[in-house]
Amino acid sequence: MIDNTMEFMQLMGANPAAFIYALARTGGVVFSAPVFGDAHVPARIKAALAVVLALLTAPLMQGAAEPGAVSVLVSGVITEAVTGLIIGLGVRMIFVGVAYAGQVAAAGVSYGIGAMYDPAGRAPTAGVPEFFTVFAVLVFLSVNGHLMVIEALSRSFQFLPAGRASLTPGFMEHAVVISAQLFAVALKLAGPVLATGIFVNAACGLVARSAPGMDGLTISFAAAALAGLFVILLSLPSMEVAMRSVFDAGFDNVNMLIMDMRHAV
């Protein structure tokens, strides 16, 4: 333990710029990535984790020469912080797609009907998006997604030298593709629930048509809610498998974004 501490102190004394740049990049990842950067995690723990990761990854920082001016150091720190934010947000985009899937599912089975009919009244949001998000976090931790985030961070030090990352046209194009994939992810995860809602509403419409005295709209809300809850519980195993594949594809996209930023180096 003492030997490792001495090595860290020697590294910071020999090239403090490497530690500063590494801290900026790791801080960007920690404060933006899911699980690490969630609101319920205290800021002190996030800062401590960023410092620890910076100490561990500073030896991997390439091209971290001592800056000749303060402006050069500030520019490099900003570049590294943006690089870390891109990596963290690239992973968080997966959870954005999952939350959107929950919103689509809630709308399909009438759980979010209050907000739909009274969007200005600040009606409470449905619990389905929160359930999807919590379930995604559990799957994320079960597949060691938190370790995969750290792995992507360490890989970025191998491919992106200090202060040399750039938002290339290839990066922008790939970012647009990833954003478009969010809708595919949402339909993939919410598809069974959405199909159930459509089927139940259609069936209630036929029943109301054959019995005009029956309040088909009210019945359809209750029936769709119960059927949606049943389908959500029934489809949890298949949803876990789907989320695993979504996480694999998401981390592949993050690695591609890192490589796209490297092309300008």
Image: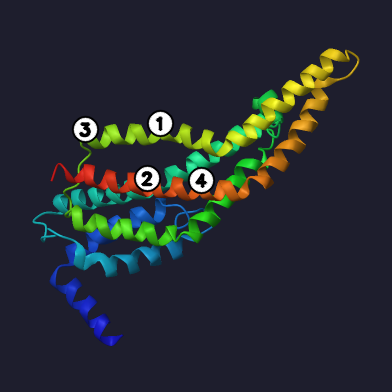
> Is the residue under label 2 in contact with that under label 1 (CB below 8 Å)?
no
Task: Give the quadrant of residue 130.
Answer: top right
Work out whether mark 1 precedes mark 2 in sequence or the reverse, and give the earlier one: 2
Residue indicated by mark 1: 180
Quadrant of the snapshot with the N terminus? bottom left
Q: Residues within 10 Å of mark 4 (few under 14, many from 20)?
A: some
Above-or-below relation of 100 to 258:
above
Amino acid type at circle 1 is: Ala
Taking the image as shown, residue 170 lies to the left or right of residue 221, namely left
For the residues marked 1 and 3, what is the alpha-carbon distance in whole angstroms? 17 Å
Work out whether mark 2 precedes mark 4 in sequence or the reverse, and give the earlier one: 2
For the residues marked 1 and 2, what is the alpha-carbon distance in whole angstroms? 13 Å
Residue indicated by mark 3: 169
Question: How many marks overall?
Answer: 4
SS at circle 1: helix
SS at circle 4: helix
Q: Position of residue 67 (x, y in %)?
A: 11, 57
Residue indicated by mark 2: 90
Q: Residue furthest right?
A: 213
Q: Position of residue 180 (x, y in %)?
A: 40, 31
Amino acid type at circle 2 is: Gly
Q: Residue at x 72, y 41 (%)?
A: 229
Q: Is residue 182 visible?
A: yes
